[in-house]
Each structure stands twice: as structure tokens, then as C-alpha cells.
Amino acid sequence: MTFKIERINSGQVTALRLIGRLKCESLGELKQQMEHGGSQVVLDLSEVDLVDVEVVRFLGICEAEGATLLNCSPYLRNWIGKERG
């Protein structure tokens, strides 16, 4: 499996569970899912196996714009912080 998104809606919150290898080629699909979410989007990263630098930058932007990163590994959290500067 390369990448999969599971969508869970509960009222105004849309949770997107990301599964597998999230690479820049998958960002278009993820952006589309986020645009059709509710007023609040939560990205559950508990089952993400691999990311590339473009994805890390994207996740940092998402978080800065109000999305919640749930179950973000310490390694990934640190990398996002470094990319933000």
C-alpha cells in the first residue's frame, strides 16, 4: 500500500486518517479532501510510514493555518519545527 485516506466526519470536525507513504505526489488528493472538510480539520498521522520534505512543509503550513496534527511522531514533529525555521 502506498497511500490511503480514511475520512471521518463528526459535526463540524473532519478527521482524515492518513495511512502509508505520504509523498508530494499525494498532496493534491489530500488538499482536495481537506477543502471538502468541515470548519475544523484533524490529520491523524498515527499510521503514516514515510514522508518527504514537501509533505513536512505542507503539514507545517496546515498546522499554522489551524489544522490539528494528531498522533504526530516526535521525529516528524521535530522535522516540521526545523522546516518552519
Image (tube, rainbow, N blue to C red):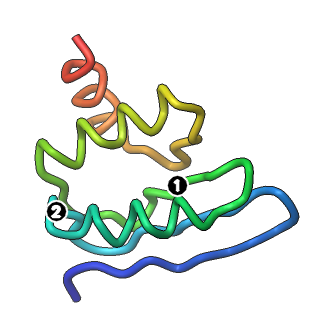
Which residue is at a point 39% across and 67% down the rendered structure image?
A: 47
Tally the marks: 2
Q: Secondary structure at mark 1?
A: strand
Q: Is residue 18 left or right of residue 70?
A: left
Tag on residue 23? 2
Which residue is at a point 45% across and 60% down the rendered structure image?
A: 46
Q: Please tell me which of labels 2 and 1 falls first in the chain.
A: 2
Tag on residue 32? none
Which residue is at a point 33% across and 63% down the rendered structure image?
A: 48
Amino acid at circle 2: Lys
Say which residue label 1 marks: 43
- Considering every residue shown, the one lying at the far bottom of the view is 1
- Measured as percent of width and height from the top left, residue 52 is found at 12, 51
Picture quarter with the N terminus: bottom left
Q: Is residue 35 above or below residue 67?
A: below
- Measured as percent of width and height from the top left, residue 31 is found at 40, 60
Q: Is residue 67 left or right of residue 2?
A: right
Q: Nearer the viewer, residue 26 or 74?
A: 26
Which residue is at a point 22% across and 10% down the rendered structure image?
A: 85
- Measured as percent of width and height from the top left, residue 26 is found at 24, 69
Amino acid at circle 1: Leu
